Image (tube, rainbow, N blue to C red):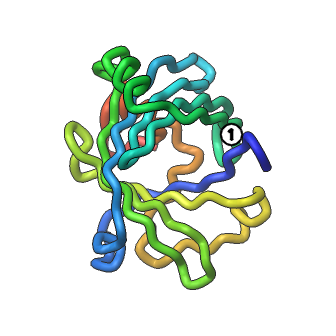
């Protein structure tokens, strides 16, 4: 579904060694705008690739548009994200049934936070997915754990939804 992201997310408390040893890339992500309705415009550098992304909606299915940026364009926009950023290392590994797990280990102010994400082709595949044993509480419907809110507010208080 072009222009649509179907994704589920989980909090990870204790990652298995194979997840931490999976191939990884550093991600620097900053927010240019965040709307009251959760819409966002962000810039991201993932390894050598830079993107401008616009997302809207909430929950498992969201609208998403991306435009590739040059490094110079990214660097020109990056200062505008000061104070509204996340830093993480993303590990990529496959489940036995072929799903791609993007396992994020956060750094900086969010150090210690680990979140696993899985994207799907459609909502039916997402609903049918059985999470691996090491995934913890599902965060898909928890706005406090969206990257934009982590960048704005930091880690939610323990025990908060």
Question: Residue visible at 29% across and 70% down?
Answer: 20
Q: Which residue is mark 1?
A: 62
The answer to whether 118 is drawn above or below residue 33 in the figure is: below
Quarter residue 157 falls in = top left
Percent of width and height locating residue 81: 36, 20
Rendered residue at 62%/53% (across/down): 7
Where is residue 109 shown, x and y percent of the image? 21, 37
Q: Position of residue 150 (x, y in %)?
A: 38, 35
Which residue lies at the image location 66% right of the left edge and 70% below the top edge? 129
In the displayed structure image, the side of residue 46 where residue 62 appears, left or right: right
Q: Quadrant of residue 53?
A: top right
**Structural crowding at the residue carrying mark 1, measured as other residues with C-alpha within 10 Å and reported as few (<14), some (14–19) or many (≥20):** some
Identify the residue shown where x is 52% and y is 43%: 142
**Would residue 67 appear left or right of 29 to someone viewing this image?**
right
Residue 52 appears left or right of 160: right
| Number of marks in the rendered image | 1
Q: Is residue 49 above or below residue 53?
A: below
Q: Secondary structure at mark 1?
A: strand
Residue 2: x %, y % from top left:
77, 45
Q: Which sits in the foreground, 49 or 64? A: 49
Identify the image quadrant of residue 4: top right
């Amino acid at each position: 579904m072009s222009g649509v992201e179907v994704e589920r997310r989980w909090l990870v408390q204790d990652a298995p060694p194979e997840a931490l040893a999976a191939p990884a890339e550093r991600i620097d992500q900053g927010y240019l705008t965040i709307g009251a309705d959760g819409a966002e415009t962000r810039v991201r550098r993932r390894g050598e690739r830079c993107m401008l992304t616009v997302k809207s909606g909430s929950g498992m299915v969201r609208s998403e548009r991306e435009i590739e940026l040059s490094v110079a364009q990214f660097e020109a926009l990056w200062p505008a994200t000061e104070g509204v950023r996340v830093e993480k290392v993303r590990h990529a590994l496959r489940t036995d049934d072929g799903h791609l797990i993007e396992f994020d280990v956060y750094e900086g102010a969010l150090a210690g936070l680990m979140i696993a994400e899985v994207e799907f082709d459609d909502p039916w595949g997402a609903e049918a997915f059985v999470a691996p044993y090491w995934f913890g509480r599902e965060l898909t419907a928890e706005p406090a754990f969206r990257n934009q809110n982590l960048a704005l507010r930091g880690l939610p208080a323990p025990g908060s939804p």
